[in-house]
Image (tube, rainbow, N blue to C red):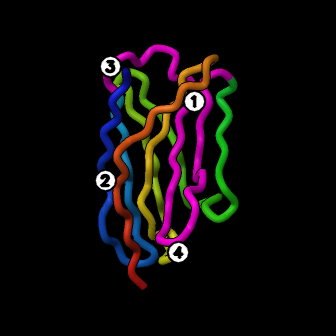
Amino acid sequence: QVQLVESGGGLVQAGGSLRLSCAASGSTSGLNVAGWFRQAPGKERELVAQISDSSGNTYYTDSVKGRFTISRDYAKNTVYLQMNSLKPEDTAVYYCNVRRTPNNVNYWGQGTQVTVSS
């Protein structure tokens, strides 16, 4: 099993920055894909950013490109999401996700609230 603990959410004014952290513990081998999803009230959960160990590739949804950066510290088993130039439309609960390959078993964090005021 894998446990994910998220931190770093909060309330920030538009244009500000936050850094989300997701620390993994337990059986962390093979967790080759990590990402951040978000879900705003009344909307479906969407993939915001993802990083893949095997390819080193990163993915960002269009609305956050140039503003958000996903990174990973293997020594600390932690995934980060640096969010700059935040906008009110970034307000949502952000969820950390890691996936064990090749079986594609997903694990989720508990979610952390990000609120951006205008």
The magenta stretch spans which residues? 25-54
Q: Residue 96: x percent and y percent?
A: 44, 43
* Residue 91 position within the rendered picture, expressed as x and y whole percent measured from the top left: 45, 70
- Mostly what secondary structure, the magenta segment? strand
In the picture, measured across the screen, residue 3 lies left or right of residue 107, that is: left
Quarter of the figure with residue 99: top right
Residue beneath disc 3:
26
The disc, 3 or 1, on the residue closer to the chain's N-terminal end is 3
Callout 3–callout 4 Cβ contact below 8 Å: no
Amino acid type of the residue that numbered disc 2 sits on in the rendered structure: Gly
Q: Which residue is mark 2?
A: 8
Of circles 3 and 1, which is in front? 3
If you read the primary sequence from the N terminus, does the residue marked by circle 1 or circle 4 appear first?
1
Please, what is the three-letter code of the amino acid marked with disc 1?
A: Val
Q: Is residue 73 magenta?
A: no
Q: Label 1: which residue?
A: 33
Q: CA distance from mark 1 to mark 2?
A: 21 Å
